[in-house]
Image (spheres, rainbow, N blue to C red):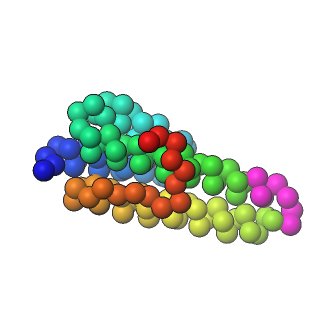
C-alpha cells in the first residue's frame, strides 16, 4: 500500500516537468531529475515514476529536436511546424495524465518513450 507522501512525490516527479513547458526551457528534464535524485531511495514507486518522467521528457526533447531539424529544409517547414506543435501538446497532455495517475497510486508508463533509465 502506498502512502500519501509517496504518491505526492511521484506526482511531483511529473508535475515538476511542467516548468519546462511554461517557464524555463529544459526544466522538464532537470526538475524531475532533481526530485527523482532526492527521493528515489525512499520509495520504489517514486523511483519508478521519476525514471518514467525522465525517460519521457528526454525523449520529448529528441522529438522536438527532430522537428526543428526538419524545419532546416525549406520543403519540410510546414510539416515541421505541425509536428512540433503536436509533440508539444502531447507532451503537455501526457505529463498531466501521468501526474493524475501517480496521485492515484497507479503505475503510469508514458507512450512513445525511449527507455534510457530502467
| 11 relative to 17 in the view: left or right | left
Residue 14 coordinates in the image, percent (x, y) = 37, 50
Residue 72 coordinates in the image, percent (x, y) = 82, 54
Q: Quadrant of residue 98?
A: bottom left
Q: Quadrant of residue 85?
A: bottom right
In this view, which residue lies farthest toward the right? 74
Q: Is residue 108 above or below residue 44?
A: below
Q: Is residue 31 above or below residue 68?
A: above
**Is 86 inside the magenta-drawn segment?**
no
Q: Quadrant of residue 87?
A: bottom right
**Is 74 inside the magenta-drawn segment?**
yes
Residue 109 visible in the picture: yes
Q: Give 104 or 72, whichever is nearer the viewer.
A: 104
Q: How many marks?
A: 0
Q: Give 23 or 37, whichever is nearer the viewer.
A: 37
Which quadrant does the C terminus fall into?
top left
Residue interval drawn in magenta: 69-75
Identified at 51% across, 47% down, the residue is 115
Residue 116 coordinates in the image, percent (x, y) = 52, 42
Residue 30 coordinates in the image, percent (x, y) = 47, 37
Identified at 59% across, 67% down, the residue is 86
Amino acid at each position: 500500500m502506498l502512502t500519501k507522501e509517496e504518491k505526492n512525490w511521484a506526482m511531483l516527479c511529473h508535475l515538476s516537468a511542467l516548468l519546462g513547458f511554461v517557464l524555463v526551457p529544459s526544466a522538464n528534464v532537470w526538475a524531475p531529475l532533481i526530485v527523482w535524485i532526492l527521493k528515489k531511495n525512499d520509495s520504489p514507486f517514486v523511483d519508478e515514476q521519476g525514471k518514467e518522467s525522465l525517460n519521457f521528457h528526454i525523449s520529448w526533447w529528441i522529438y522536438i529536436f527532430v522537428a526543428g531539424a526538419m524545419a532546416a529544409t525549406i520543403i519540410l517547414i510546414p510539416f515541421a511546424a505541425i509536428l512540433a506543435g503536436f509533440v508539444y501538446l502531447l507532451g503537455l497532455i501526457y505529463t498531466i495524465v501521468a501526474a493524475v495517475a501517480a496521485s492515484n497510486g497507479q503505475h503510469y508508463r508514458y507512450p512513445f518513450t525511449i527507455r534510457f533509465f530502467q
